[in-house]
Image (spheres, grey):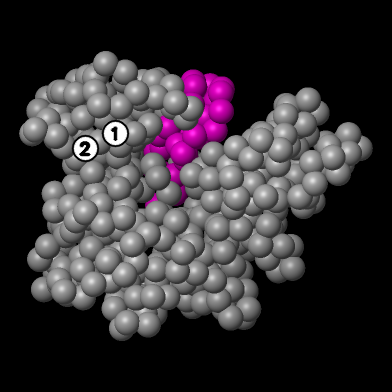
Amino acid sequence: MVNVLVVGAGGREHALSWKLSTSEKIDQVYAAPGNGGTLQNVELSVTDIEGLAKFAQEKNCFTVVGPEDPLATGIVDAFVEKGLPIFGPTKNAAKLESSKIWAKEFMKRNSIPTADFEIFDDAQKAKDFVKSYEKPVVIKADGLAAGKGVIVCKNKDEANDAIDTILIKKSFGDAGSKIIIEERIDGVEASYIALCDGKIGIPMATSQDHKRVFDNDEGPNTGGMGAYSPTPIIDEKLGTEIQEKIIDKTIHAMRDEGFEFKGFLYAGIMIKDGIPYVLEYNVRMGDPECQPILMRLDSDLYDYLHASYEGKLNELPEISWKNQYSVCVVLASKGYPSSYPTGDEITGFENISSDAFVFHAGTKKQDDKIKSNGGRVLGVTALGSSLQDAINNAYDACNHIHWTNKYHRTDIGKKGLSNL
């Protein structure tokens, strides 16, 4: 028997902890720092690499890294150096996410389909480019910005405002010292996540995230307001194309360039006229995509994460999935992704049916009560025999949960219904 340490505090990490705890090969699952829903929390920051390594060594843990920050900082390199088993990419491999500029240049030199782009660190030069560019644009901060460093612009005024926000006002700090201005590709967005061992990548179930804060994809981008799996947008033919032209190509090119990629490789895909383009890479499981994907997973997750670490994914059978749909609705604090209140008591968990599971994200346990402690607070996730059933079950569960400043979108999964 082995113990597992899950690094992180969000809904993704609660989902990983929950699924790993069902493995017969695992004794204890610890979460650092965890949240109000995870059971065995360790008071260590995700960037306290020395502290996490010491804990993992003492408790004989296989470590699973959830968020991007410790990966970008080099937690995997530090653990490997100490001979500690860990799931995730090295610091160099994590550049696919930690630097959007590095990722775009990587795609360009390896002929991986993505939008045309230019790079700027000077606001006036960026505005001059926008003025002369005839197509709509997206402005992106180069570094990590918690999923909020992408500004989709409807016109040139919005593009100039975005340039000021990132380069002049420094709204994303050092993450915005450089920007990418890229052509806005208008199509249908989906998430394609593969589990990689440095040599091969095996696809996880498909999913679709809902990034904007308000219904009908209005308002600013967030870390994600909900997701569902599988998505009918990626059929078998398109899935094969994405796997071969994007995932396999990325893994082989990374290996050729000396950056062996192990871990979850997430490709945010825009599909236009049947052609998939990479909007961005993430080097970890998506959040909230993780929640509906793991609800449908029938295989032992630990087997696959450990095989990724050992470089032996080719020795395992195909991943098995429940023949059901799954929907995750994020319950957030009013005001997210800007300023929002915390400390509200949350009630109603006891009324959730067996079709649903509530994954905690921005919560804390205080005096035996669960209180809000972040922008995205809970990920209410449910299964159903059809997508509509899963939507109904998820929203039914949402209606049982209450706190003063609760907010959620009411249209999670509708995009999928329109494509069935």
Residue 44 is a magenta residue: no
Check the image and report above or below for 57 versus 67.
below
| Residue 358 placement (x, y as % from top left) | 22, 36
Mark 1: amino acid: Asn
Q: Report the residue at 51% width, 55% height from top.
A: 282
Q: The N terminus lies in which quarter of the figure?
A: bottom left
Q: Report the residue at 34% width, 75% height from top.
A: 79
Q: Which is more toward the observer, 27 or 68?
A: 68
Kind of element beneath mark 1: loop
| Residue 192 placement (x, y as % from top left) | 50, 52
Query: Answer yes or no: do the residues labelled 1 and 2 have beta carbons within 8 Å?
Result: yes
Indicate which disc residue 364 carries.
Answer: 2
Marked residue nearer the N-terminal end (1 or 2): 2
| Mark 1 closeness class: few <14, some 14–19, many ≥20 residues within 10 Å | many
Q: Report the residue at 34% width, 57% height from top.
A: 46
Highlighted range, magenta: 205-230
Kind of element beneath mark 2: strand
Mark 2: amino acid: Lys
Residue 345 in view here:
yes
Question: In this figure, which residue is indicated by the disc labeled 1?
Answer: 373
